[in-house]
Image (cartoon, grey):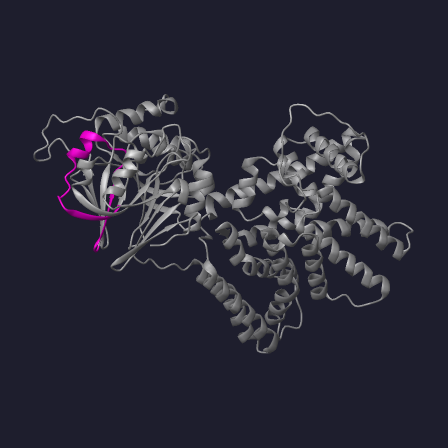
Amino acid sequence: MGKGYAYKVLADRCNIIDGKVSCREYLRNIADYCTILYEKYLPENEAGILSAMIFGRKNHLSYEDRELYKINGLMHILAVSGMHIETMSLIFLFIMTKLPVNFRVGRIFLFIILVLYGIITGFGVSCIRAVIMCGLKITAELVGKTYDVLSAISFAAVITLLINPANLFRCDFILSYIAVTAIAVVYPALERGMNIGTESRGPIYNIIVKPMLFGVCINITTLPMILFFYYDAALYSVFISIIIVPLISVLFLSGILCAVFGGIFPPAGMFLAGGIHFILSFYRVICEWCIDNLYGIRIIGYPGAVKMILCYFVIAAAVCAVRRINNRRACIFLCAVFVIFPVYILSYSRDVGVKITFLDVGQGDGIVIRMPDGKVVCVDGGSTDVGGLSKYRIEPYLSYEGIRHIDYWIVTHIDSDHYSGLKELLERRRYNGVVIDNIVIADTKICRGEFFNVFSDVLSDMKTETSADMLSDLISYVSNDVIDDIPDILYIDNNDSLEFGDAVLRCLSPVSSVSPGCGASYKYNNQNESSIVFELSYGSFNALFTGDIEGESEDKLHIDTGKRYELLKVAHHGSKNSTSETFLQKFLCSDAVISYGKKNRYGHPHRETVERLKTYGINVHNTAEGGAVTVRVVGNGYKIEENLLNQEK
């Protein structure tokens, strides 16, 4: 929207009814031509990176490269911003000094070039700001006035909002102006504080300390907002920037020259492409090394308004104090507070009570339970109608909650609408950094056998002595051997329980063949019947999670008659064959949650099931209409929140 596009369409056939080409279209055709040249001289992925970096064409950027730069906090170098405009200006000014061009004419011509470049790149928010500020600086030089950077920032912000008031709520607008304000206000103050009483600055300061201080200023001031929008920030990105950013100018210039000479003299294009390939390969090596060795040095989780206000208050107070104090030790202490306090407060979390979230996964199940001792239990995570479930539903929620470590992942049974997200999450392990300690499956023959049948294609070349070995080998395989700690595989039946401080998770099904009164001959005929069923108890709060059980499996459950459950996870997405009247007569219940997708082909939830629940006075919540359903248990009470409907009990 910031570039004037409402949506994108794909057409089978296109008829040109007007042959006129506007200036804007002509300039963008130039960018298309340059992109074709990059694809001619460079590997496809590197051509995509260069096209994104110089012309803002992110549609040519491969998914792997996008994730690589995003995880390492380097997406800003792939967006046309002030850094690119400054590089373009320096290149042009250098050329002007070698030509007999009048100062005023040169500056005016520079501004025209920058405007044309902005049109080529689509004039994103950051590009608009940079071009306006550069134009104001040129104007100040031409009329002999002083250039005030804060006034320029304010003027650029007003113009950007007049163009599109909706920009005020865009993350690129907010981050761009916070970053440039940090450069104009925060950096000079901290630099002054670090250099009080220092008469001379050696080469080490200019080469290492100054760029690091510059990067720290930008990273710390934008950190709360990055977490607000993306829930994830790499703290080590400032150190990568010190290595990568100095080469941007070389890469930028090489890319422009490759486009200029590549179409005229191919050997020159090949020569320049060689240098570009070397730099981009170096970037990749650095980024991959950081993912493998520094991934954990990051903050994750939504910060909330209180943390953000507190962070910016401390940042402002530290900067104001440094500008007034003339004691070097005191200033260095305040600089340390400026860096350490925001990182500490944004990474701090306090675990209170139990939090249960039924994710909106479409036609499937996905539950995340945060226990009072801070441990995390995930239940299922699959869907039959939502593609990229892990990438677009599970991982964003885990990041929002600041979760990267899952203690137990319970797969109630082996149906795709219960495990597809888990499989995808393991395949994306390198990019999401999620660590799973234990995967829990039902201790039944049909569960183990079905799991092997489902994944036999990826396990055909592996040794499969036991089911546990098969799953461990699978996890290692799909993660390309990047998982250091392979999850342990736990088999569970109604004799087992897990404790989490004051909370206890007790398994009720599948029923063990040695359970009293059940008989050694009891067998499960399908996956739904063999689903893991468990209850969660925390103080006076009790919740029952029923997987996809139906009929006979419901009858086999050992539930004390008259026991009260505050929460029921309705079995099998509200199927008419589950949650029978006989089943509901066994216990009392206040609230129930049904997970299903809108307009699903199964007709879930069936009308009979919903009516039965309401007949017994149970409040029914669902993920299709309410979005994610969250149950918070604190003290002796609990409340239910539906993300879309915003209703609270």
Mark yes or no: residue 308 visible.
Answer: yes
The part of the chain drawn in magenta is 539-567
**Which residue sits at x=32%, y=31%?**
471
- The C terminus, quarter of image: bottom left
* 475 or 406: nearer the viewer: 406
Magenta-span inclusion, residue 131 = no
Q: Quadrant of residue 360?
A: top left
- Residue 332 relative to residue 355: left or right: right
Q: Quadrant of residue 379?
A: top left
- The N terminus, quarter of image: top right
- Residue 106 relative to residue 243: left or right: right
Q: Position of residue 165 (x, y in %)?
A: 65, 54
Q: Position of residue 321 (x, y in %)?
A: 57, 75
**Which residue sits at x=71%, y=64%?**
149
* 148 or 298: nearer the viewer: 148
Q: Is residue 194 above or below residue 85?
A: below
Q: Is residue 16 above or below residue 292?
A: above
Q: Position of residue 177 (x, y in %)?
A: 63, 58
Mark yes or no: residue 94 visible.
Answer: no
**Which residue sits at x=69%, y=38%?**
275
